[in-house]
Amino acid sequence: MAGYNPFRKFRIYQNYALAALGIMAMISFVIFPSYFMLQRGGRSSRDGIIATCRRAGYGNVDQYLLHNLRENHQKLRAFYSLLTSYLSQTTAGNPWEFYAKYPALVQIQQNYSQRISDETLIQNWLLTRYAQEKGMLISDPLIVKRLQMITGGDISNQLLDEICLQLDLSDGYLTYLLREEMLAGYIRQSFFLSMIPTTPLDRWTLYQRIYRSLTAEVAVIPVELFQKEVKEPSEAELKKFFEENKNRVYNPNLPDSGFEIPTRFAFQIIDATPSEQLLASITREEIEKYYEENKATHFLRSTARPQGSQDQPASLPFDTLFPTVPGANRPGPLPGLDSLPGPGLNLDLETPVERPQESEGIDPTPAEQPSDPQSRLTNPAVYHSVAYRQEEEPTTEETPALNEEVPEETPKFDPNILYEPLEEVENTIRQILAYQKMDAAVKEIEKKMKEFYTAFTISKSKNMEPLDLATLAAEYHLNVITVETPLSVYELQQHECWRTAAYRSCLVKMFSENSAPYEVLIGRQTSQLSSPDGGPIESIGWATKKESRRIPEFTDEGMKELVRDRWLMVHARELAEKRAQELADLANQSKDQSLTVSLAGQDVAVVETGPFTWFTRSLAQAGYGRAPLVFGEVREAGVALGTADYNNVHIKAPGAGFMEAAYSLQPNESAVAMNQPKSLVFVIRLVESSPDEESLWQFFVKEKSDEYLGAGKGESLDAMRTQWIEEIERNVGFQWVNRPQSFQEREE
C-alpha cells in the first residue's frame, strides 16, 4: 500500500464517484422524503405540523408525536385489559364479585373502553408538560401505591413481569406510561376539585337544585314569528354572516349553529331483543321439553305463592335466562347493591362457623331439649341450616335415636304440588327460549357480518353485492330498521328510531367512532356494572353509506336560503325576548291569577308542567355506587316520565336558562328565559315549590355534603373546563395549526 494516494484514485474515477454521490443525494433528499410523506398520508413535513408551542421544553406537535401518543394510549389500554383478565381469575370468572372487589379497576376499564379523540390525546400531552413545569412529580412509590389501590393489593412483581412480557414492554417504559397518565389525570382532577362548591351558600344553592321540586305555568313564544319584522339583509351581509359561521357544524339545536355540512350515515340495525315473531315461533314441544329438564331447579313451588296462583313475575330473572358463565353475552343474576361484598373481600371457607347463640325453634342448651320424640322431629330441616352439630342424647326406649326409623307412616309428596304447573310458567319458558334463540342468532349474524366486512375491505369494490341485514333479521325472526337516506345527528334525533334504546346505543357508537361503511357495530347496555367486555348486547348493525363532513360554498344549492333563514332567526331573538318581557310584566301585575287568565287574548300558548328539578339522579347509569346527577326533565302536564323530548308539544329543549329563571322565582312570580337553541322564549310563572324552604333547610343541615357535591357546577362545567385549557394554551404559547376533529364536534 506504500505510495497509495486516494485522491489520485478519485481523480481517475471522479466521474463515476460524482455520479454515485449524486444518486445517493437524490435518494436521501428526494426519494426518502417522498416515501415518508406518502406514509403520512400524502402530506409534506410542513403539513404534518399539528400545533406549535413557543414555551421552551414543550416542542411542536407533529404527526409522528401524535402517532406515538396513540400507541401509548393503546399500550395502556392493553395493560389494564390484561390486568383485568388476570385478576378475574381470583373471582372464578364471576363478574359481579369482580365489580365489588375491584371497583377502581372497573372504572378505569370503562374509561379506556371509550374511544378517545386525537384532540384529547394532544391536550393530555400538553397538560402533562404543564404539570411538570409547575413542579408536579409522580414518584415510583406513588405509582406502586396506585397499582396496589386499584387491585386491592392483589398485584405482584411476577404478575407485572408476565404482563410486560406479553405486551413486549420494559419495566421502565411501563413506569413512564403510568407516570404520564397519572400526571394528566391529577392536573385535570385539580380543576374539577376547584369547581366543587365549597362555601355554605354554594352548597345550599346546589342542594336546592337537586331536591327542590317546582311546578310552573309556561307561555311559549316562537322566535320565528318575529322574523317578518326584521329588515331583509343585503347580499354582502349574508356573505359575511356565512364566512363567519361556515366552519361550525350545522345543528339547529345549538344557539350558534354554523353551516358546515355534518357527517351523515345511512344504516341498518337489528334489534337484539326477542320480537313478537320470535316468541310466536317457540313451539309447545320445546316448552314442554324445557319444563321437564328444568322443573326441579327452576320451577319449584314457592311457599309464598298460593297454589293455583296465576300471577307471573313482571320480569325474568337473569339467573334463569342466562347462567353466569365466563364470556357469556348477558350477565348473571344482578345482586342488590347492599348485598355486594366490599372491595377486597375474601370469603374464608376454612374458618369454622361459630355456634349461634339463638336459633328460631331451637334452644341452644341441649340439656333443656324436650324428651318428646315428636318435638325432636318437628322441623328436622332446621338442624341442616345451622353450622354446628347437635349433641346427641342417649337413646332410651322413650326417646328413639334420630337415625332410627320412625314407626309412623311418612306421607308421600305429590309432584303436581311440588312443582309449578306448566300452564302457570308457559309464558316464562317461552321468553327464556326466545332469549336463548336470539343470542344464538346474534352470534351467527355477527359472524356473517364480519366475514362480509373482511371481504369488502379486501376487494374495495363498490359493486360488491351488500349483505342485507333485513333478510338476515327475517330469517331469525328479529326486528330491523333500515334508513336509506343518510342522516346527521340532528336529523337522527328527530327520527323515530332514536326513541328505541336498542337502536340508539348502536347509533351513538356509529357517530362517535366515525365508523366506516359495513364496519360491524355492537350496541350494548351501559351501566357502571358493565363487564370488562361491555354490557348485554341489545343491537347489532352497520353503516351502509357515509357522507363525510365538508365545508360548503355560499353558491351551493339552497345555501343562500339557509343562511338567510338563520340570519333572520338570530336578529329576531331580541324582538321575541322584548315581547316576552312585556307579557311577564303583565303577569306580575296580577300574581294571584294564572297565566291563562292574565294573558288571555295575547295569542300565546300556555301550558302547565309536571314537577321538575334542576338536577336528578340518572337511573339508567345506576350501578356500583351512587347514580350520577344529570340535567332534570321538564315535562308538560300529562307527559310520561322520560318522554319529554318526544312528547312535549310546546316546551322544547328548555336548557339551563329555563332552570335558572325558574329557580330564581317565588310562587306566583314570573320571569323570562330562552330555550337552549334560542328558538323559543318562555314566560315562566312559578306555581308551587316543594318542600317549603324551612323544611328543605332542615334536611340540608343534616345531610352529608358528599351525597350531592358531585354535581359541581353542573351544566357550566364543560364550558369552564374548555376555558381553563384555552388559558393554559395561551400561557405556554400553544397554537393549533391543523386541529384534529373532536368527537364532540362530530356528535354536534
Image (spheres, rainbow, N blue to C red):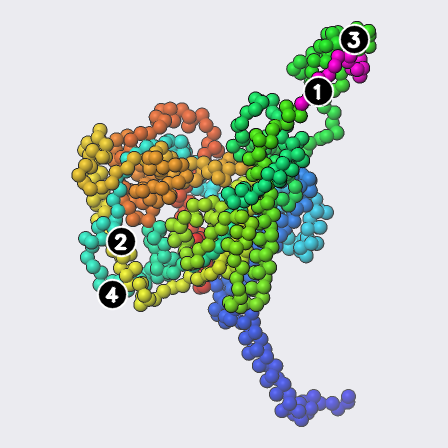
Which stretch did the figure color magenta? 401-414
Mark 1 is on which residue type? Lys
Image depth: mark 2 or mark 1 in front: 1
Q: Does the stretch in magenta take in 156?
A: no
Residue tagged by mark 2? Answer: 569
230 or 501, which is in the foreground? Answer: 501
Tell me if mark 1 has few (under 14), some (14-19) or many (20+) residues whose alpha carbon lies within 10 angstroms of its own: few
Task: Give me the disc on residue 412.
Answer: 1
Image depth: mark 1 or mark 4 in front: 1
For numbered disc 3, what is the local secondary structure? loop
Residue drawn at x 35%, y 44% is 653
- Is residue 93 visible in the rendered image? The answer is yes
CA distance separating discs 4 and 3: 110 Å
Tag 3 near tag 1, CB within 8 Å: no
For numbered disc 4, what is the local secondary structure? helix
Image depth: mark 2 or mark 3 in front: 3
